[in-house]
Amino acid sequence: MESMLKYNINNKVKVKLTQNGRDELKRQHEELWKDIPKGPPYEYRPPHENKDGWSEWPLWCLMASLGHMCSMGPNVPFETEVLLEVEP
């Protein structure tokens, strides 16, 4: 039996977004609010990235927002190496 890590999709992951990922998140914000007459209640704010470029997400949220862009191609939404939050 291969070694497996049990991981809860509510736990955090850290990723380095690509420009494609940043653009998609902004597009989703604009799409969500495009038909509201007064516009969004606040301007788009990109995810916080630390000084090394990592942003933190619950795994389910990352996949709900950017999973449709994940493929074996050049236009990935985040770099392929991720950091997983593991419980001791």
Image (tube, grey):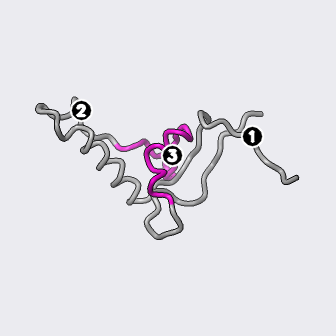
Q: For this view, does 70 lie left or right of residue 39? A: right
Does residue 51 show up magenta in the picture? yes
Is tag 1's residue or tag 2's residue first in the polypeptide sequence? Answer: 1
Return the residue at label 1.
6
Q: Quadrant of the C terminus?
A: top right
Taking 43 as reference, is 23 above or below it?
below
Residue range highlighted in magenta? 46-70
Does residue 25 show up magenta in the picture? no
Under circle 3, the secondary element is: helix
Residue at the location (83% across, 51% down)? 3
Return the residue at label 2.
42
In the image, what residue type sits under mark 1?
A: Lys
Label 1, label 2: how far apart the Cα atoms are: 38 Å
Taking 56 as reference, is 18 above or below it?
below
Q: How many marks?
A: 3
Under circle 2, the secondary element is: loop
Under circle 1, the secondary element is: loop
In the image, what residue type sits under mark 3?
A: Met
> Residue 49 location, x and y as percent?
46, 46
> Residue 84 location, x and y as percent?
65, 45
Residue at the location (79% across, 48% down)? 4
> Residue 53 location, x and y as percent?
49, 52
Q: Nearer the viewer, residue 73 or 41?
A: 73
Residue at the location (50% across, 44% down)? 62
Label 1, label 3: how far apart the Cα atoms are: 18 Å
Using a 10 Å C-alpha cutoff, classify the residue at mark 3 as few (fewer than 14 neighbours), some (14 to 19) or many (20 or more): some
Return the residue at label 3.
63
Is tag 2's residue or tag 3's residue first in the polypeptide sequence? Answer: 2
